[in-house]
Image: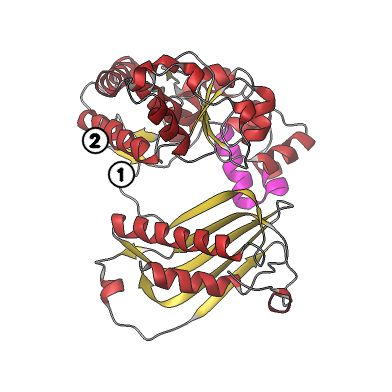
């Protein structure tokens, strides 16, 4: 979907189309205040001057997405709001309405499934679609069916999307970015050298910033540069599995099927604070946030019909270092109190003497609530494991201040 979060907001506020708008950073209070001030006007008639400017934003939030007009200033997803304010100070700011986004996400996916039922859900704004057995799916290399999907989504929801049509998921993912917004790109196997090889290495989904740095040090800047290397050389430099995968990816090889049903591995909630908080001095505020996160994760589990056994926490400190802890309890649960209790035990194993900028709660080892594994009675077995990138092992308990 094209700038999905922003596009959903522009359906509500069409007067902002064509303007630089960023989505993220705050809660719906900003939106509610604007609506209250212009209660006598339809939402579509609220003047653009009523919306806050990015340069006036104060906080620690990050951008969820931005309109294409805002992206021209270098603003993009996951960028800190304060940094974005230096690039596009006069961009307008709107908070995320997750309920509305989820509604449109379910809507556009249902439209696709009516046309091509083999769909793999890849998050709120992205799917893979298998055209193979769909009548007419091979016409013009898949372009006819892609146009039908694109047109159907736009007519029913008002939203635009961009499609990449290719022999496999790897190339389709890259192709979907070629003609944004509202574009269709068809890439055949014979096109890999001309259309894929000139792209930067990061365009391969699976090559992250660390791998990119290492590739650049080896003077490999494009996907074609990777393809020019021997598989064994890539294995020697990047490991057996990753090096071999990198060679296949550079040549456009990907055997992964479109998976129509998959079980989530975990569910989590996290929040970045408006200001750094300290476990002792801001104990009450942190405690309320911590409890709310546990309740939100529990509600997510219950809504989707899952329970989990491994409860974990994520902390990011004021120096951007991160620590995580997890605890596996003896039974599956989606109860907020049980999650809060186990997550609290995890906190006892972290050095909380420094200020915090982010807090998160995660539940893993998920199974369906009505599964035999959950319903079976099993003896209580309490084990734990930890990953710590910050504190020195064995010193956490001695240095932990009053917990929240």
- Which secondary structure dominates the residues rendered in magenta? helix
**Can residue 306 be seen in the rendering of this structure?**
yes
Q: Quadrant of the C terminus?
A: bottom right
Residue 391 circle label? none
Whichever of labels 1 and 2 marks the residue nearer the N terminus, that label is 2
Q: Which residues are magenta?
A: 234-251
Q: Look at 32% across and 14% down and name the residue there.
A: 140
> On the rendered structure, is 106 left or right of 173?
left
Residue matched to label 1: 260
For marks 1 and 2, give the CA distance.
Answer: 9 Å
| Callouts 1 and 2 close, C-beta under 8 Å | yes
Q: Quadrant of residue 202?
A: top right
Q: Residue at x 56, y 64 (%)?
A: 284
Q: Is residue 240 magenta?
A: yes
Q: Which residue is mark 2?
A: 117
**Tag 2 secondary structure:** loop
Left/right placement of residue 23 relative to residue 121 reads: right
Q: Position of residue 118 (x, y in %)?
A: 27, 37
Q: Residues within 10 Å of mark 1 (few under 14, many from 20)?
A: few
Relative to residue 170, is residue 210 drawn left or right?
A: right
Q: Is residue 264 magenta?
A: no
- 275 shown above or below 327: above
């Amino acid at each position: 979907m094209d700038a999905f979060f922003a596009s959903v907001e522009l359906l509500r506020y069409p007067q902002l189309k064509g303007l630089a708008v960023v989505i993220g950073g705050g809660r719906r209070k900003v939106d509610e205040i604007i609506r209250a001030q212009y209660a006598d006007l339809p939402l579509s008639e609220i003047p653009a001057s009523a919306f806050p400017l990015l340069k006036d934003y104060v906080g620690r939030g990050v951008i969820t997405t931005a309109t294409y007009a805002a992206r021209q200033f270098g603003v993009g997803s996951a960028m800190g709001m304060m940094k974005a304010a230096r690039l596009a100070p006069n961009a307008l700011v709107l908070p995320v309405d997750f309920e509305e986004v989820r509604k449109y996400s379910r809507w556009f996916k249902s439209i696709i499934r009516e046309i091509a039922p083999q769909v793999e859900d890849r998050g709120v704004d992205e799917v893979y679609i298998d055209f193979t057995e769909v009548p007419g799916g091979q016409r013009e290399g898949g372009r006819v069916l892609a146009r039908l999907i694109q047109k159907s989504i736009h007519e029913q929801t008002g939203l635009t999307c961009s499609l990449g049509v290719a022999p496999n998921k790897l190339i389709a993912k890259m192709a979907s970015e070629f003609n944004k917004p509202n574009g269709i790109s068809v890439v055949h196997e014979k096109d890999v050298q001309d259309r894929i090889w000139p792209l930067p290495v990061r365009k391969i989904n699976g090559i992250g910033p660390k791998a990119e740095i290492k590739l650049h040090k080896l003077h490999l800047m494009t996907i074609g540069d990777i393809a020019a290397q021997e598989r064994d050389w890539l294995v020697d430099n990047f490991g057996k599995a990753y090096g071999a995968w990198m060679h296949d990816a550079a040549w456009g090889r990907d055997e992964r099927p479109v998976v129509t049903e998959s079980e989530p591995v975990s569910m989590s909630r996290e929040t970045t604070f408006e200001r750094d908080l300290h476990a002792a001095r801001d104990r009450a505020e942190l405690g309320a946030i911590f409890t709310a996160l546990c309740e939100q994760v529990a509600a997510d589990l219950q809504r989707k019909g899952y329970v989990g056994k491994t409860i974990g926490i994520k902390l990011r400190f004021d120096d951007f270092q991160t620590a995580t802890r997890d605890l596996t309890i003896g039974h599956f649960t989606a109860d907020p109190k049980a999650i809060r209790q186990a997550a609290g035990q995890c906190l006892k194993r972290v050095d909380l003497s420094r200020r915090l900028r982010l807090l998160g709660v995660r539940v893993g080892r998920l199974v369906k609530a009505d599964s035999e594994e959950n319903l079976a009675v099993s003896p209580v077995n309490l084990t734990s494991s930890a990953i710590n990138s910050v504190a020195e092992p064995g010193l956490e308990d001695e240095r932990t201040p009053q917990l929240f």
